[in-house]
Image: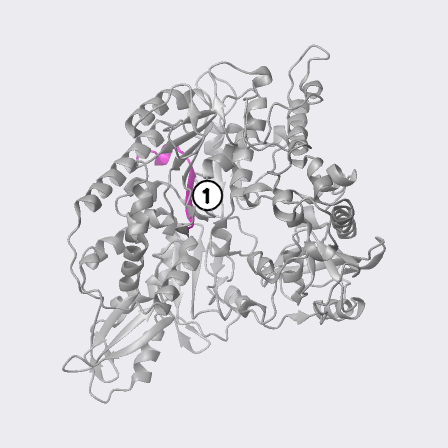
Amino acid sequence: MAKGLCLNGRKRLSEGAEGPRTARKRRKADGGPEVKSCHLSAALLGEDSEISQEQLYELLKYAALGKCHNAAQPSWCRIYHQSHLAGVVVVVLHEMSQLHFYRFYLQFKHLRKVFRHRFTLAPSANFLVSLYGEGTNLKPQNTPQGLTSTSSECTTKSSDLQCDPIIQRYGEKKQGLTSYTLTLEEQKKNDYPIEGSPGCKGYISTECDQQRTDSSPLFGLDCEMCLTAKGNEVTRVSLVDARGRCLLNELVKPESRVFNYRTRFSGITRNMLLPVKTRLSDIQTRLKKMLPHDAVLVGHSLNSDLQALEMIHPSVIDTSLLFARSEGRRFKLKFLAKAVLGKEIQCEQKLGHDPTEDARAALELAQFFIEQGPTKVAELNLEMLLTAEKLAEVSKNKAVQQPQGCGLQEQLNEPPPLSKPCFLDCLQVTGQKPLLLGRQGSDSSGLCQSNLSTSNKQILQKALEDVPLSKFSIIQFTLGPGYLASHLHAGLHEKVSSKLTDMLTIYAGPFEENFCIKSVKKEFGRCGPIQSLTVVTETFQPYVCIQYEVLEAAQLAVECLNGAEVAGSCIKVQRPVTAAMLDCNVLIKELELDVENQGVIYVAGLKKSLTETELQEEFGQLKHLEALFLPKDLQSGKHRSCCFLKFQKTQSALDALEAINGWTMKGSELRSRKALAPGHLWKWIWQMNHSNEKQGKHIFHEKMEQLSDSEQNLRKKVKKLDQNIKKLYRSLQNNSLCVVLFPGVNSTQGSQPGLGLMGIKDEGRSAC
C-alpha cells in the first residue's frame, strides 16, 4: 500500500498552532516566562496510520519526559514545545476495539469531533500490563527514590529462566545457526519480501537456495535509506563477511526525486550523491554474484533493508527478533551492541549511522547468540540492563543533590527492586507520581490504586479531583465486566461488516433490455474502484448492483449519476433500503464533519497508468497541499483509480474541490468530493470488504431487525461513556496531551485491531 507522502518539503498538518506573534503574547498570569502553545504534527494516512505499541510507548515517554531526560522525539509524529505540556492523560477503554468505535460512531459524538489525529493500534492480550508492567501497585507511601515496588511471578534469575522470552522461544540448549533462521511464516509475519508475493513484483532474487546447514557462511547486511517519491530508497549499502571484513560499502543514487535525505540518521547529503553513478540494479547484480548459494544474511530489522533493496533472500537471521522480548517489543541495535558486545555504536558525535559498523554489530550479535546459546543470553538479563541504563540516564540528567554514596547509581549496583521493567519506571524516578485510576477486577489488568473506584461515575469523580495534581495519568473506563467481549462474539463484527457492505453498494436503473453493461461499468468506474458489478433481473426492467471499494465512490455515484443518462437510459441511483441504512444520510453527514476528515478530499477517475511521481507533479500546483495517499490493492499491489489529498488548511481543500472537478488528466475527467473514511481505515475496510466477498455475504439485507433491549442499553452506556470523557477533557488544563485508547481484542475467540485518538487541548477549541 502506498504511504502518505509529504510534498514539497511542507510541514505536516499541525494541531492548535498559532502565529509567533500570538504565542509571544501568551504569558503566565504571574508574569513568569511565556507559555508556548503545544501542538501535534502527524500525517496519518494509509500504512503510516498503523501504529505499534512500541511507537505508542515512544510517544508517551517523550511527552512525559522530554529531551531533558534523553527521551527521543517520536518517529511517527512530532510534539512541538513539549516542555510546555501541562500534563499527559491516557484514557483506556477496557476491552474495546476499533470495531466498537465505528459501530457506535454516532454515539461517540465528543470523541470524533475533538481529536484530530487517529490511528489504528496493534491489539494486545493485556494492554495495561504491557504499558506499565505486571502487578503495579501505586501505594500512598513513596518507596526509596520514588520507585514503585513491582512484583512478578516470572523472574529471570539464573536458577529459574523458564519465563524468559528467549528461553520460551528457543529452549535452553545450544543449537546451530539453522535453528535461528526465520521460517517462511515468520518472514511473512514480519514483512519480509517473499517469492511470489503480490507486493514483490519486480523484486530480484539472490537465487540462493534453502539448503543451508549449521556451517553455512554468515554475512552482515545494512542499508541507509532516504525518502523519495517512490518511498524508501537505498542510498548506501554495506556487506561484511563472517570475519567482519567489509566486502561492500557503496553509495547508491536513488531513481526518484528525493524528499528527505534523513541526514541525521543516514549521514547522507545531497552533495555526497551528486557524483554517484551506481544504481540499485548495479547493487542487486553485485550482491547476487557475491553471495554463495547457502549464504545466511544477518541484520537488525533486516526486512526493511531487503524491501529497500527490492531483493528476496530465503535464509535470514534478524537480531531484532533473535534477542526476543515480551509483547512484541524489540531492543535497539545500539543497546544490544553495548550490553552484549561491550561496543559503542551510533555515537552522537558522528553524523548519521555507519552501515558497515551496524552490519558488523548485527553479525557479531548473531555469532554470540549461536556460540553461547539461549541460556547464556538470558542470563545477561537484558531487560534489567535496559532499565538500569534508563534509570542511570535519568539520574545523570536530574539536577538533584544527594549525599555521596546514596545516589541512584549506587542503588543500581544492588539487586534492582523491579523484576520486570515497565513504561513508568523512568517517569517515577524523576520524582513524578503517575496517577492510575480504574476498576479492580479479575481481568488481570493490574490496575491498582490506594482508593479504588467501582463505577465509571466514581472513576470520573476521582479523576476530576486528582488529574490536575498529576503530570501523567492513566484512567480506565469500562462498560461492565465481560459486556463487550460477549457482545463482540455475539455478532458485532457481523453488524459492522453488513452495514459497511450496504454503504459501499448502490443500485442503478432501470435500463433497456439490451443495454451495454460495458458503458455502465465505465461510467460508474469514474466514481472510484468497483469491487463487483451484477445485473439484477428480478425486476421488470434490468438494474445493476454495484459494490465499490471505498465509501466516497458510492456516495459520489449517488450524487453525480442519480437522474443522469447512462447507456441510453435516465436512471435512478440509490443505496439499499434496510433497517441498518435508515440513518445512512445522517452518518454520511457526520463523517464529512469528522475532524480527521477536515482538509482531506477524495479524487476519482485516475488512469491506472499514472505513477505516484506524475500525480505529485500534477497535484503539486494546488495550494497548501501536504500529502497524497494512493491506495493499492493489498493482493496485487496495483494502485486503484483514486487517491486522497490532504491539505494544511480546510479552505484550501474546498478550493481544490472546485478546481479539480472537471479537470482532465491524461484524457480522463476527474471527479472529487470531501473524504468520508478517515485515513487509517483504508486497510481495515479493504480487508473487511474482501472477507465479505469470500464468505458470499452480498447485498441483500432485507430482514428488518428490532433493536434488542441489550443493544439499546449498550448504546446508552456508550453515549454516557462519551459524555464522561467529554467532562474529563473539559477539566484538563490547556496544553494537556490527551490520548484515548481502544486497546483492541486479542484472544482465542478472535482478534480486532485497536484505535487511538489524540490531541493537545487548546483554549480555542475546548468548547466542544
Residue tagged 1: 125
Q: Which image quarter is the C terminus in?
A: top left
Tell me if residue 341 is in the magenta stretch: no
Instruction: State left or right for residue 588 relative to residue 745.
Output: left
| Colour mapping used in the image | one colour
Instruction: State left or right for residue 82 relative to residue 408.
Output: left
Tally of numbered tags: 1
Q: Nearer the viewer, residue 437 or 44?
A: 437
Q: Nearer the viewer, residue 239 or 388?
A: 388
Residue 425 coordinates in the image, percent (x, y): 57, 27
Residue 28 coordinates in the image, percent (x, y): 46, 21
Tell me if residue 760 is in the magenta stretch: yes
Height in image: 353 above or below 27? below
Task: Provide the residue span drawn in magenta.
Answer: 752-767
Mark 1: few/some/many CA within 10 Å (<14, 14-19, 20+): some
Question: Which amino acid, mark 1?
Answer: Ala
- Please give the name of the residue rendered at 68% of the width and 30% of the height, measured from the top-left corner: 389
Q: Does the rendering let one see residue 264?
A: yes
Height in image: 353 above or below 247? above
Residue 153 coordinates in the image, percent (x, y): 54, 31
